[in-house]
Image (cartoon, rainbow, N blue to C red):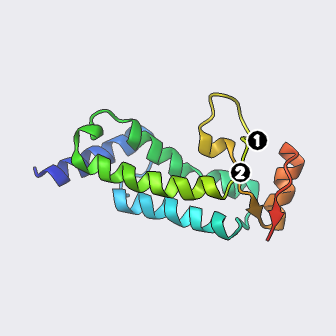
Amino acid sequence: MGVINAFAERFRQVLAESGRATHVSPTELLDRWDGFVVLCEEGYEDNIYEYNNDLSVRDAIDSVLRDGRLREFDQWQWFKEQVDAIDARFRAVTYPEPVRGGADWPWWRAHVPARAGSELAADLHSRYGVVVSVV
């Protein structure tokens, strides 16, 4: 088995072990995270339930990044660099302070978009007392 195939196989195992779909490639997972961040850059227009659901892609990425066996592959470093770049864009468009969860919450779940559609903006205000820009 080639190195790339071994990475892809372990990648699928990690996703399966974390209860996620195993048919997603590293590139597809990155594309999903990037697509979600683009929606946030534009002002996320859906509600809090969809927002929370859409964040699950970053949860899956976290499973991959935490796996010690995947870290042994050169492809892991490439994957991490891609994630870091997308994460930086996400952080740039979120409310500056964490507004949800406690210390055990991952940073991407604790922060919310600084710009949102009217439905999400209303959800954020009613649940967390946060006022964000409405697009």
- Disc 1 marks a residue whose amino acid type is Val
Residue with the mark numbered 1: 99
Q: Is 78 placed left or right of 87 in the picture?
A: left
- Disc 2 marks a residue whose amino acid type is Val
Q: Which residue lies furthest to the top in this view?
A: 103
Element class at badge 1 = loop
Element class at badge 2 = loop
Residue shown at 29%/39% (left/top)?
A: 71
Q: In which quarter of the image is residue 94?
A: bottom right
Residue shown at 11%/52% (left/top)?
A: 2
Q: Are marks 2 and 1 in contact (CB under 8 Å)?
A: yes
Q: Is residue 31 above or below residue 112?
A: below
Judge by depth and name the residue closer to the eye, 3 or 130. Answer: 130
Residue shown at 61%/52% (left/top)?
A: 91
**Could you tell me residue 49's position as x and y percent?**
72, 53
Judge by depth and name the residue closer to the eye, 24 or 96. Answer: 96
Residue 54 appears in view: no
**Could you tell me residue 20's position as x and y percent?**
45, 47
Residue 43 appears in view: yes
Q: Is 60 placed left or right of 53 in the picture?
A: left
Residue with the mark numbered 2: 112
Label 1 neighbourhood size at 10 Å, few (<14), some (14-19), many (20+)? Answer: some
Residue shown at 36%/61% (left/top)?
A: 27
**Could you tell me residue 111's position as x and y percent?**
68, 46
Q: Is 75 placed left or right of 14 in the picture?
A: left
Disc nearer the start of the sequence (2/1): 1
